[in-house]
Image (cartoon, rainbow, N blue to C red):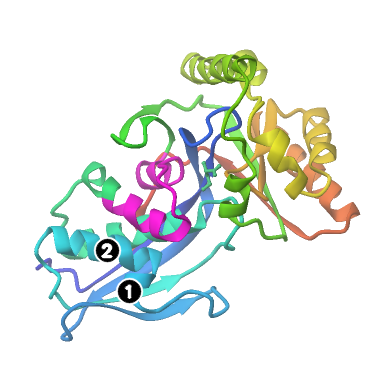
Amino acid sequence: MSNQQEIRVFAPATVANVACGYDVLGFAIDAPGDEIVVRHCQKPGLHISLITGDDGKLPKKASENTAGVSALDLLKHLGMSDRGIEMEIHKKMPFGSGLGSSSASAVGGVFAVNELIGRPLSKKQLLPFAMAGEASADGAWHADNVAPCLFGGIVFIRSNEELDFAQIPAPKNLWAAVVHPDIEVLTKVAREILPKEIPLENATQQIGNLGGLLCGLIQEDYGLISRSIHDVIAEPRRQKLIPDFYAAKRAAISAGALGFSISGAGPSVFALCEGEEEAHRVADAITKVFEKIPINSQAYVSRINPNGVHVIS
Ligand code: HSE
């Protein structure tokens, strides 16, 4: 048993897909993020004692809760299912937001418990357990939120099945403007509207853009990044779930964004920008479009978060 009696962790929001990398590319931002607290207790098993910020929507039964599922899977793997652990979940971002809310809980839950019991596994070894937690929420198996939430930075996943991934360096002056309009899009619905087959021409364009984006990030070539952030597969179908999506896109590009698309399954949108000032200007321009509809929104301006989930106390 570790000497630490209580651990509080922060698990950040993430932007999945990054336009042309559907299910295979994502990055972490500094805020918002979920906080998970775990402590030892006498009663055997994992117990969720408190959930805040969820409007009473999340199940308290550990085996039905994203954060609980990932932690339970880890404890089972270690033969420690009887260990008495109490968990608090403080949701700091909305569900169905496209900000990786369920991934943050899945990652936060397993990471916090791993720390509490003396860190038997590395972050890399925690990935499959976090994936199981995330899959319990949306039924799909993709690491483009979970991996950046766990490791930080920009993560490219070559294979979700094999969990073969690589961290991509973030250019020093790359900033993200992420805006969440106050509407809910269910990931399940946003996945169902995607086509099962795509024309070869679109596949070729998307592969070109993804390769271009990865090269642009590695070479710090902002022009190449800008030319590459285009999604010809998911965005044309999903944009209809986001009011005035193309007006927001035009506003972001006019305000100087390198590129703009949907964050994960939406409704949040994101823009990549060269510089902090530009990112603030772009966030304001996007927010104004939603204001006009009128839809309230929250804007987050952030560098690429290099740390991912971490202990805060
Ligand atoms: N890659 C996923 C999607 C992210 O676009 O459906 C949402 O969880």
> Pointer 2 and pointer 1: residues touching (CB < 8 Å)?
yes
Q: Is residue 89 visible?
A: yes
List x then y, in percent, for residue 73: 23, 61
Q: Which mark is residue 71?
A: 2
Outermost residue on the bottom side: it is 43
* Residue situated in front as seen by the camera: 260 or 187: 187
The answer to if 134 sits in the magenta stretch is: yes
Query: What x and y, as percent, mark residue 308?
Result: 39, 46
Q: x, y percentage for residue 277?
A: 70, 35
Q: Quadrant of residue 160?
A: top left
According to the picture, the residue beneath numbered tag 1 turns out to be 62
Question: How dense is the environment of label 2, judged by Cα within 10 Å: few (below 14), some, or many (20 and up)?
Answer: many
Q: Is mark 1 within 8 Å of ligand 1?
A: no
Magenta range is 129-152
Mark carried by residue 245: none
CA neighbours of label 1 inside 10 A, class few (<14), some (14 to 19), many (20+): some
Q: Earlier in the sequence, mark 2 or mark 1?
A: 1
**Disc 2 residue type (three-letter):** Ala
